[in-house]
Image (tube, grey):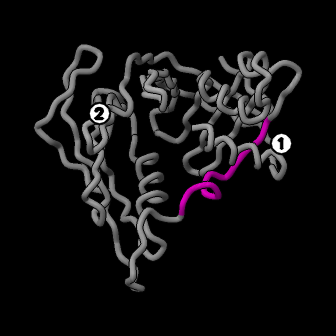
């Protein structure tokens, strides 16, 4: 995760931040348990709206990862760092407010500039239409005292390493926007294109890789609406 924020740091010197104020309303907040590289469990908290257009996080581990890149060994600044991050799915832009001590920064970044152009290379010159496949399996997982079926998900040209995802479909949440975005950025070669289809609905409860290792698991869900106004700073109600 630290390497990802090195790229963000570079943007600080070339950023073009809009002066226009933006207000968004978020409907759900989910806390996920994730496994760190040191085999320690961290918590990642994400808020989002029902349409799946905006994602927000102020998770401590994101702030500290960025702080370690900026402040190196100044532990007091690392420990006291704060971050607010909004991702606009339609515009593919991230807005980040970061502060620690007397240091404050606000910037935006185009995530397409930092994503790979494709996950596979093909010798064929002819464009290939790719589908993102989602198949319900008989496997079930227990999350927050409820059972959910796992869906096997993979791009149609790369079936060897699927991921397995459990959704809570009782929540009114359009997850297709974010699934389509990341599938199109990570799963395609340059000469391929992803066919846009609705894949699933509901909130992600658990994700496993092809080795049956849990990548993330929901540990708490709240439905209290949150309003965020941002323009070089964040105001949260």
Residue 50 drawn above or below residue 133: above
As drawn, is 89 to the left or to the right of 203? Answer: right
Q: Position of residue 215 (x, y in %)?
A: 37, 34
Q: Which residue shows up at 36% across the image and 26% down it?
A: 217
- Numbered marks: total: 2
Q: Is residue 204 magenta?
A: no
| Region rendered in magenta | 106-116
Q: Which residue is mark 2?
A: 167
Q: Which mark is residue 57?
A: none
Residue 119 drawn above or below residue 93: below
Q: Position of residue 134 (x, y in %)?
A: 25, 50
Q: Which residue shows up at 28% across the image and 31% down it?
A: 169
Measured Cα–Cα span from mark 1 to mark 2: 38 Å
Residue 54 drawn above or below residue 184: above
In terms of depth relative to the viewer, which is nearer, 121 or 148? 121
The image quadrant where one finds the C terminus is top right
Q: Which residue shows up at 25% across the image and 37% down it?
A: 212
Which element is circle 1 on? loop
Q: Position of residue 178 (x, y in %)?
A: 46, 46
Q: Position of residue 16 (x, y in %)?
A: 81, 50
Q: Which residue is mark 1?
A: 19
């Amino acid at each position: 995760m630290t390497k990802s924020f090195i790229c963000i740091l570079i943007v600080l010197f070339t950023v073009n931040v809009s002066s226009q104020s933006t207000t968004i309303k978020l409907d759900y907040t989910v806390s996920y348990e994730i496994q760190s590289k040191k085999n320690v469990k961290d918590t990642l908290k994400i808020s989002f709206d029902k349409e799946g257009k905006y994602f927000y996080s102020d998770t401590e581990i994101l702030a500290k990862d960025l702080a370690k890149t900026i402040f190196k060994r100044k532990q007091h600044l690392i420990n006291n760092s704060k971050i607010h991050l909004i991702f606009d799915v339609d515009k593919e832009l991230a807005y980040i407010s970061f502060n620690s001590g007397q240091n404050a920064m606000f910037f935006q970044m185009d995530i397409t500039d930092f994503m790979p152009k494709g996950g596979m290379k093909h010798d064929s010159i002819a464009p290939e239409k790719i589908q993102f496949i989602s198949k319900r399996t008989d496997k079930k997982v227990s999350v927050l005292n409820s059972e959910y079926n796992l869906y096997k998900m993979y791009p149609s040209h790369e079936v060897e390493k699927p991921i397995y995802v459990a959704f809570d479909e009782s929540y009114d949440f359009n997850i297709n926007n974010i699934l389509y975005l990341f599938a199109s950025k990570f799963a395609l070669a340059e000469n391929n294109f992803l066919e846009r289809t609705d894949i699933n609905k509901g909130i992600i409860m658990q994700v496993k890789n092809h080795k049956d290792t849990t990548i993330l698991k929901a540990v708490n869900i709240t439905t209290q609406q949150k309003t965020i106004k941002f323009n070089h700073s964040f105001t949260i109600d």
